[in-house]
Amino acid sequence: MIFEAILLTVITAATPLVIAAFGELVTERAGVLNLGVEGMMIMGAVGAFAAAQATGSPYIGLLAGIATGAVFSLLFGFLTLTLVTNQVATGLALTILGLGASGMLGESYVGIPGIKVPQIYIPYLSDIPFIGPVLFHQDLVFYLSIALVIGINWFLFKSRRGLKLRAIGDNHSSAHALGIDVIRTRYLAVMFGGACAGLAGAQLSLVYTPQWVENMAAGRGWIALALVVFASWRPWRVLAGGYLFGAVSIGQLHAQAFGIGIPSQFLSMLPYAATIVVLIIISHNRRTTLINTPASLGKAFVPDR
Amino acid sequence: MKKLALALAATAALVISVGSAAQAADKTKVCFIYVGTRTDGGWTQAHENGRLQVEKEFGDKVETPYLESVPEGPDAERAIERMARSGCSLIFTTSFGFMDATVKVAQKFPKVKFEHATGFKAAENVATYNSRFYEGRYIQGQIAAKMSKKGLAGYIASFPIPEVVMGINAFELGAKSVNPDFKLKVVWANTWFDPGKEADAAKALIDQGVDILTQHTDTTAPMQVAAERGIMAFGQASDMIKAGPKTQLTAIVDTWGAYYTKRTKALLDGTWKSEQIWDGLKDGILTMAPYTNMPDDVKKMAEETEAKIKSGELHPFTGPINKQDGTPWLKDGEKADDGTLLGMNFYIQGVDDKLPQ
């Protein structure tokens, strides 16, 4: 019983990390480093909350969150892809802007009871003991996150467009020479990343804690960025890593409530310590690291005409 | 990252407030420095409500400029100094982390008066003020012991500083006064503000069997979780009834307005002097949100306790009290002094947690 309860909270905690990280993974696979995940996420959260309040529908809220994230990321796309600004600085600016703008937009929503995305009851499957409630009695966002990993994995490694996208990320000049539209693909990848971050934000304000408070992403965008590196740009590893992060952070709260005498500060630190350990392990084998890292990551592309 | 954002916001706010400050020079300026935003629904909003009360009370006589989202650290010093230069007569700095900056700026501006919330460093022109939150937590503990079927409550704590430890102990003392076997489970969230994490902590406590919840973190997320799971809870800093209309029993509400009005009046009368003030329920700096969702006899008990604390008949930290390991701390009838309370770093008997050191 308690184990089932823990698993349910782990899933809620891991889902926004996983979704935001999937989006960033695709963006980075196309060779664009967008450090604005936190900003896009918080914009998604406020957009979703506002739309859900206005319409009364959590599903329209989710759509609005996705749209807000995507539109907001377009700003990043325009600056870095069309005006060729520095990606790192622009991404950081996007986060700052997102935190400020969301606070302003959300000012009138503070303290208003939120609208929660309902859980979907899948007949028969939900009745299976243990697995049923954990896997088949979840909200739509959880199912979307699973669909995303399957879809992204197929898209990146099995489809022709995915191959092109990876080619751009690895060597944009060669891809351009082959006649692939680098800028267009990157715009789409950035918007996909924004849409995912927006959905992750919507999950925060409509599922995780259905309410709006300023800065409610509380650093989850940064964890998602770390997850992409942690997963060495592989979708399934993002999923596994997200759940590991979720499990450690939830586990430490339960360990405290059980009265296990480990300092809580130490337990709070564990997810970050785990990231460092994994980084050490993956960078130990330099060859596999280099294979996975998009070689053009963070580099500006200016087509020579 | 967040710091950078806050610094930019603070700079922008400075420009705006200094701009508006130049207009009316004849009014007395009572200024406020906030660590968060005015609408954070918690700590800073409570101070903002206090500022608004000053405006209402004194009307045209005062002007109350403020700076919000001022980060603690070097930027705070700059922000406070700008305020002092812009002609403020009295400046309230409303976060523990502004303490050193306040004292430093105060040395440069001996004619300006400063008041620092929750700190301990005073000077001739620096007063400190704080609220006896523990009085409210004692009442909450009593209510919890009456309302809990299992005799087990959950406490979501932020950081192991004396203020928080004192609150946990006061809650347990209140509960024990009703049910001597009452137990308290504590989970440290290690954050003041992270709705997701606070909600997770609430869920973890409920999953492990507590049937009543209280918090010393700033968002309404735990209240919301309690409402979802159908258990009772207490609000923190603000009345959180909107997050749990059928869940909130009461809340400790920071009502700084009474204090701000009193000090502004002293300033206008010319009677202001530096003091170190630690006010409680009787001074109105702290109030209890309406006692709701409880039977009449529990409500009556809570009101009586509140009255006794106000009249001075009851001090929550009165012996006999043992420390967690069973060693005696206060003898029968002995009251804890303020110094011990303000430096509290140990649990009393009945708290089911190991205090992080």
Image (tube, rainbow, N blue to C red):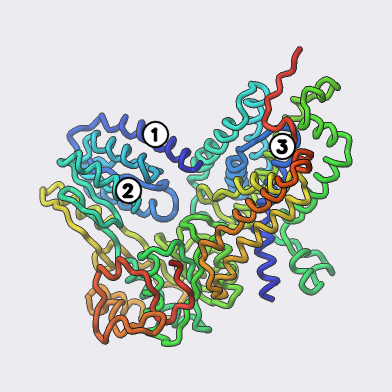
In the picture as drawn, the residue positioned furthest to the top comes out as A305
Residue type highlighted by circle 1: Thr
Front: mark 3 or 1: 3
| Residue A202 locus on image (x, y percent) | 64, 49
Mark 2 and mark 1 lie on one chain; the one further toward the N terminus is 1
**Left or right side of A81 for B40:** left
Classify mark 3: helix, strand or loop.
helix
**Left or right side of B136 for B292:** right
Q: CA distance from mark 3 to mark 1?
A: 34 Å
Tell which of B15 and B168 is nearer to you.
B168
Identify the residue under disc 3: A28
Which residue is depicted at the point 59% across and 59% down? A270
Residue type highlighted by circle 2: Phe
Tag 2 near tag 1, CB within 8 Å: no
Front: mark 2 or 1: 2
Q: CA distance from mark 2 to mark 3?
A: 41 Å
Tell which of B23 and A281 is nearer to you.
A281
Q: Is residue A299 above or below residue A238?
A: above
Question: Tag 2, which chain?
Answer: B
**Corner quadrant of residue B314:** bottom left
